[in-house]
Amino acid sequence: MKRLFDRKDMLILSYGRLENEQNLVFQVNVRRISIYILEEGTILDEFIKNKNVIQYLDHFIIFLPEKKEFQNLFWKEFYSIFGKDYEKIINTSNNIFCMNEMIHYMKENANIGNQSMLLDYGCGSGLSLYTDYIGRLVGYEPVYTMRQQALKRGMHVLGSHAFNMLPDDYFDAAFACYVFHLSIQEKSIYQLSQKMKKEAVLVANFYKDIDVVRINRIFDKLNYRVMKITDIQERFGSIYEYVKR
Ligand SMILES: C[S@@+](CC[C@H](N)C(=O)[O-])C[C@H]1O[C@@H](n2cnc3c(N)ncnc32)[C@H](O)[C@@H]1O
């Protein structure tokens, strides 16, 4: 895929073939995902007319599956395929800045210190190791390709099975940096909630504000206190705080 990124091509990704779309040259299937290159000069707006179509990370137009339960599977496939290039296609300093903002917020407002047990939910390649936080930190990352990068970097990182085996009420606080737009299933939020102590705080940002209403409803249902902290659309989207009651 390196050549594609070098040429600044726009890739269109979907489960299944996009037979009715014109302007697509080249098609290849990787795992279960169909990948197309968009012909140069095509107007992107034509492709982004549907609510399940997202322009993503400057290189991708994602056609999400209609059904919510398949959407997170799609994202996990996406990170399995493109994960090894993750740090080439994002601005890493932006993500580290975002994590630092969340951690500073927790230190100032939620009594989080170096003895606290902190969770990096959806830790990706482990960039949180470059934040100012020097206390106890555990990463959760369901995708092998991403988890391996975090492990190599020296992070204590768990996959889904190991995460679910942790005792309940384990974490004092958690942050999710650029994760909650990935159609996280209600069941996964319940599992995350079980691992949080009472009064624990979770801070998360919403890329392009995708899925913010649905996720907030889930936390409401779990009786969390939900509060918007800030809204920096040009950088991270909105950032929310969730406190377990
Ligand atoms: C945009 S990356 C962000 C990684 C890291 N937080 C950062 O800011 O660099 C999103 C990460 O969320 C992970 N992810 C996907 N589905 C997830 C889920 N259901 N629960 C937790 N993480 C998930 C992806 O595998 C990917 O590593």
Image (cartoon, rainbow, N blue to C red):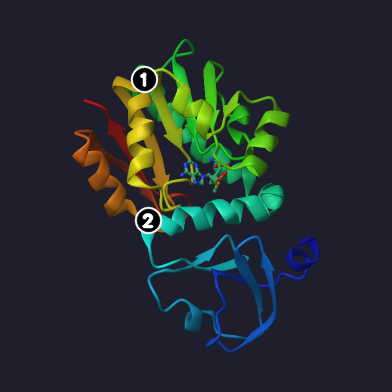
Q: Quadrant of residue 191?
A: top left
Q: Which residue is mark 2?
A: 209
Residue 10 position in % (x across, y down): 64, 72
Q: Which residue is mark 1?
A: 168
Local secondary structure at mark 1: loop
Q: Identify the residue shown where x is 50% and y is 35%.
A: 99
Dot 2 alpha-carbon crowd within 10 angstroms: few under 14, some 14 to 19, many 20 or more: some
| Amino acid, disc 1 | Asp
Can residue 66 be seen at all in this image of the molecule? yes
Could you say which is closer to the camera, residue 73 or residue 84?
73
Q: Is residue 131 above or below residue 23?
A: above
Can residue 100 be seen at all in this image of the molecule? no
Could you say which is closer to the camera, residue 120 or residue 95?
120
Residue at the limit of the structure toward the top, as seen here: 115
Residue 146 position in % (x across, y down): 64, 41
Question: Is 47 situated left or right of 147 in this image?
Answer: left
Compare marks 1 and 2 and give the one earlier in the sequence.
1
Residue 138 position in % (x across, y down): 53, 24
Q: Quadrant of residue 227?
A: top left
- Label 2 CB sits under 8 Å from any ligand 1 atom: no
Q: Nearer the viewer, mark 1 or mark 2?
A: 1
Residues tagged 1 and 2 counted as in contact (Cβ below 8 A): no
Q: Is residue 237 above or below residue 10?
A: above
- Label 1 CB sits under 8 Å from any ligand 1 atom: no
Q: Identify the residue shown where x is 45% and y is 28%.
A: 164
Question: Is 174 situated left or right of 6 in this image?
Answer: left
| Amino acid, disc 2 | Asp
Query: Label 1 to label 2, Cα distance in Å?
Result: 30 Å
Dot 1 alpha-carbon crowd within 10 angstroms: few under 14, some 14 to 19, many 20 or more: some
Q: Identify the residue shown where x is 40% and y is 20%.
A: 171
Residue 147 position in % (x across, y down): 63, 36
